[in-house]
Image (tube, helix red, strand yellow):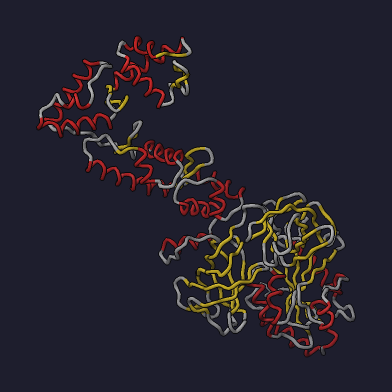
Amino acid sequence: MKNVIIGTAGHVDHGKTTLVKALTGIDTDRLEEEKRRGVTIEPGFAYLDFEDGRRAGIIDVPGHERFIRNMLAGSGGVDLAMLVVAADEGVMPQTREHLGILAQLGIGDGLVVVTKADKAEADWLELVVDDIEQLVVGTFLESKPILHISAFTGEGISELKDALSLLLDNAHERDVKIPFRLPVDRVFPVDGFGIVVTGTLIEGSVKVGDTAQILPSGEKAPIRNLQVHGENTETAFAGQRTAISLGGVKRGVVVRGDVITAEGTVNVTDAIDVKLNVLADTKRTIKNSAELHLYHGARTLLAKAMLIGQSELHHGESCYARLKLKEPLPCKRGDRFVVRFFSPMETIGGGVILDSKPKKRISRSEEALNALKIREQGSAEELTDLAAYELGGVFSETDLCKRADLDKKTCIDAVEVLVADGSVIQLMQNKYISKKVLSKLSKECTGYLESYHKSYPLRAGMNIAELRQKLLQNTDTAEATAVLKKLSDNGVIMLSEKSAALPDFSISYSPTQSNIHEKLIKELTGCGYDVKSPDELSALFSKNEKRDFEQVFESMISGGELVMISQQIFWLRKTYDKAIKLIRNHFEENDEITLAQCRDILGTSRKYALAFLEHLDGKQATKLIGDARKLNKGF
C-alpha cells in the first residue's frame, strides 16, 4: 500500500491545527505550552483514514517565525502539502515563507485550504482567493484546488477529504526496497522500551531486529520495537511516521537531528556540493563566503557558502556551490535543504545536494562543472561512470555505491551496463576500474618505462614491484598486478616474471658488449651447473672490459637469461629449466628428496645442489622437514 505524508504549512494562527483535528479527530497540540498559548511549537502528528482503507499521515507544523526550525524539521518528509490561509487575514509573511520552503524541499503536489471561511464575507473571500492565485504562480501549487473550509461549521471538510484522496492516487511512491533512513525529530525515554526516536521514514523499510546505525556518531543499536501511528508493527515502510525503540542506547547517544539508518549506507560529511537557489520574492542576496543556517531533515547547522562561477546570487537565481559545514552532516545525493540568513534570521533559499562526499579541494574547472551537471541531471549509468572515474583506481561495488551515492541494486545494475559497453573494466571478482582511469594509467606507465629504458638501456625492464609502487601507490598488490596484466593484454607493456618493458624495447649491445655476451654464454653453457662466481667470471675479461661486463651481466639477469640461485651462483635459463624438470620428475615418483639425491640427479657437487634446494625453499616450491625436503606449493 502507498504510504503518504501530508503536511500543513501557513501563517501562525491560520487554523492549521484546528483543520487537522476537524479532518482526523486528533488534536496535534500535545504540549502544555501549546495548549496555553494556542500556538503549535513542535510538529504534531495525526493520521487520516479514507473510506477505501487507505491511511495518510499528517504533520501539523508550526507557523510562527520563531518556530521555523521546528516547521522545517517536520516538513522534511512531506509528500503532499496543504497551504493554509485564513479567510479573515489572507496571505501573510509566513504564508509566503512557508510556500518557498515547501518548494525548496521538492514537494511537488498539494492544494490550498482557505480556513475560517465562516468569518469572511463573499467579496472579501474572493479577494483572498485572488491573492492566493497570484502567490502560487510559478510554484507547484499553481492551478491546484483552492478549497474553502470552516472547521467550526464543518463546511468543506468532506470535499477536502475527497480532494486529498485524489492527490494520494497520483502521489509519488517512496522506494521501500533500498536501505532505510529516518531523520530523528523527537527523542524520549519510555519505561520498558528504553530510548525511543520518532520521525518520518523517508527511504526503505525497517524491521524489528534490524541493526540501526546512529549518525553522525556511528553508534549501533538493535531495533527492539516499531510503531506506526501509535500501533505496534513488525515492519515500517517509507512514507510512514515511525517510532523506533533502540536497545542498549543511553540518554544523549541519540539526539534530535541525528539520522537512524542501515549501517554503512549514508555518508557523513563536513562539506557538500549543491545546486543553490535563492527565492524569487526575496530582497536578499547570497554573497560568496556568506554564513548561512542550513536545514536538512531535522538537523540545523551553520554553513559557509562558496559559490562556483558567481560572486553573488540574487533573487530567483541559482548556481553550483560548496557548503562548508561547521558540524558533521549525514546526507545523500538528492537530499533537499533550506538555507536561512545568519542574521537577520530569514529564509533565503535552498537547494539539492549533488555530492555528499566531495573531493577536499573545490574546483571551478570545466571538468568539475560537468561533473556537477551529471550529478544534478545524469542517469544512473552516467553517475556510476563518473564515480568510477573519480575513484581514480581499482574499486569494489561498495566503494562505487558510496561514491555514486546510489543504492546497491541501482549501482550494480549500472555497473553491468558499463562493463558491457566497456566504460568500466572488471579486473577480478568484485574489482573494477574505469576505462578512462586505465587510459590515464597507460600514459603514465608508458612515461615511466620510457624514462627507465633511457636510463638503463641494457636492462630488460623495470622491476614489477617498483613499477607497481610508482604507478599504483597504496593499491593492494593483487589489484595492482591485475591492472598491469590488463595493460599487458592491451599491448601497452610487456611483462616477464619480474620486469615490465615497452613492447618495442629490446636490449642493444655495443660490439664489445656483444663479444662479452657471447663469451659468457659459451662459458656458462660449458660449465653446466658448476658455474663460476660473478667475480670469477669477471676475471675472464680485461680491465678495460670490466664496466661492460657488469652491464652485460646485469642485463642478462634482468632479461631472464640468467637465474640467480644464490648470491654467488647464476645459471643460464636453459640450465635452470633442465634442473627444475629433473626435480619435478623425481617428485612424481617420490614424496621427498634428500641433498644427496639432488646432487646425484643433477650430477653436480654438494655445494650447487644445496644452493638449488635452498632456492626452491625460498620460492616455497619445497619445504625442509628433517633431513629431507617435501613439496610445499610445488612447481
- Locate residue 337 relative to residue 85 in the image: left or right: left
- Tell me if I can see residue 58 in this picture: yes
299 over 12 or under it: above or below: above
At a point 17% along the width and 27% down the height, the residue shown is 538
At a point 28% along the width and 17% down the height, the residue shown is 529
Looking at the rendering, in which quadrant would you find the N terminus?
bottom right
Task: Give the number of callouts.
Answer: 0
Pinpoint residue 626: horizontal percent, then vertical percent.
Answer: 47, 17
Q: In which quarter of the image is residue 100?
A: bottom right
- Tell me if I can see residue 420 in this picture: no
Q: In which quarter of the image is residue 583?
A: top left
Looking at the rendering, in which quadrant would you find the C terminus?
top left
318 over 332 or under it: above or below: below
Instruction: From the viewer's side, name the closer residue of 84 and 455.
Output: 455
At a point 73% along the width and 50% down the height, the residue shown is 210
Pinpoint residue 622: horizontal percent, then vertical percent.
Answer: 44, 21
Q: In which quarter of the image is residue 363?
A: bottom left
